[in-house]
Image (cartoon, grey):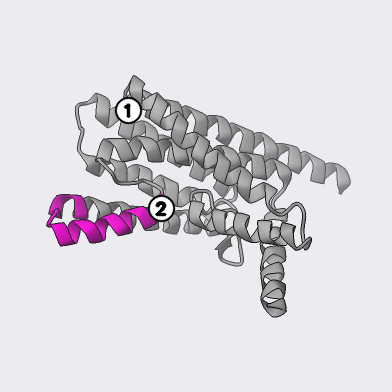
Amino acid sequence: MTRSLKRSALCVENKEAGVRSVTRRDLWISAGLAFVAGYVDAVGFIETGGLFVSFMSGNSTQLGIEVLDGGVETAMVAVGLIVAFVIGVIIGGLAAGHLRDQRRWVVLGSAAALAAVAGLQLAGVDSSWRFLLIAAAMGALNTLYLADGRARVAITYATGTLVSVGLALSALLTRTSTTAWRRPLLLWGALAAGAVGGAGAYRLGSETALFAAAGALVVLMIVLSVQRRVSRIGRAHHS
C-alpha cells in the first residue's frame, strides 16, 4: 500500500512538473483553447447525430457500435473523424519542427478550418463529412505545448485531464501536494463549460456558432502573438 501511494505521489509530481513548465499565462490560453474545443465538440455532436470532433475515444466506441449494428455511413464518418484528428496532430507536429511561430499559425489555421465549415453550411453543404476539417484542427491544437515529443498540456484530452485531477486529489488527501489539482481541474472545467456554451450557441444556428468559435480562436491567436512579442522584448532587455 505504501509503495502504491509513493508511486502515485511520484506520478503526480511528474505531471505537476510538466504542467508547471507551462507559464500561468500559457495555462490560461490553454483553458481558452479547451473552452473552444468543448464548444465545437458540442456543435459537432449535435450536427453529426452523436459523433465528436475532439473526443476520439467516444468516436472509437461509436464506431464499434455502428459496425455491429450495420450503420455503415456513421461508421465511415467516425473513421474519417479519427483519421482527420491524427492528421491534424501530424501537421501540428511538423509545424512545431519547421515553423518559428508554430502556435500562432496552428491556431490561425484552426480558426480558418472552423470558418470554412461554417461557410460550407451557409452554402448549403450539410454533410457530416465537413466536420473532418474541425477534427483535424482539434488534433493540431493538441500540439501547441510539446516537450520531448509529448503534449505538456492536452487541450482536448478530457479523460487524461480527469486522471490528473484524480491523482492530484489523492496527493491532496495524503498531503503530498496541496495544489496539483488546480490546473487540470481548470482545463477540464473550461472544456465542460465550452460544451455548455456550444450547445447554447447552436440554437442560433451551427454556422453562427462556428463563426463565433473561429473568432474566439483569432482572439487567442492575437494574444499568443502579443505574448511572443512581449517575451522577445523582455529577452532583448536582459541581453
Label 2 vs label 1, nearer the camera: 1
Nearest the eye: 212 or 103: 212
**What is the span of residues highlighted in magenta in the rendered image?**
55-75
Is 139 rendered above or below residue 5?
above
Near mark 1 (Cα within 10 A), the count class, few <14, some 14-19 or many ≥20, is: many
152 sits left or right of 55 in the view = right
- What residue does disc 1 label? 206
Which image quarter: residue 32? top right
Nearest the eye: 38 or 4: 4
Is 76 rendered above or below residue 219?
below
Is 143 rendered above or below residue 41?
below
- What residue does disc 2 label? 88
Q: Position of residue 166 (x, y in %)?
A: 61, 57
Secondary structure of the residue carrying tag 1 is helix
Which amino acid type is marked by label 2? Gly
Q: Position of residue 159 (x, y in %)?
A: 49, 55
64 sits left or right of 100 in the view = left
Q: Is residue 63 magenta?
A: yes
Q: Is residue 96 magenta?
A: no
**Residue 196 visible in this rendered orientation of the protein:** yes
169 sits left or right of 64 in the view = right
Q: Position of residue 130 (x, y in %)?
A: 26, 40
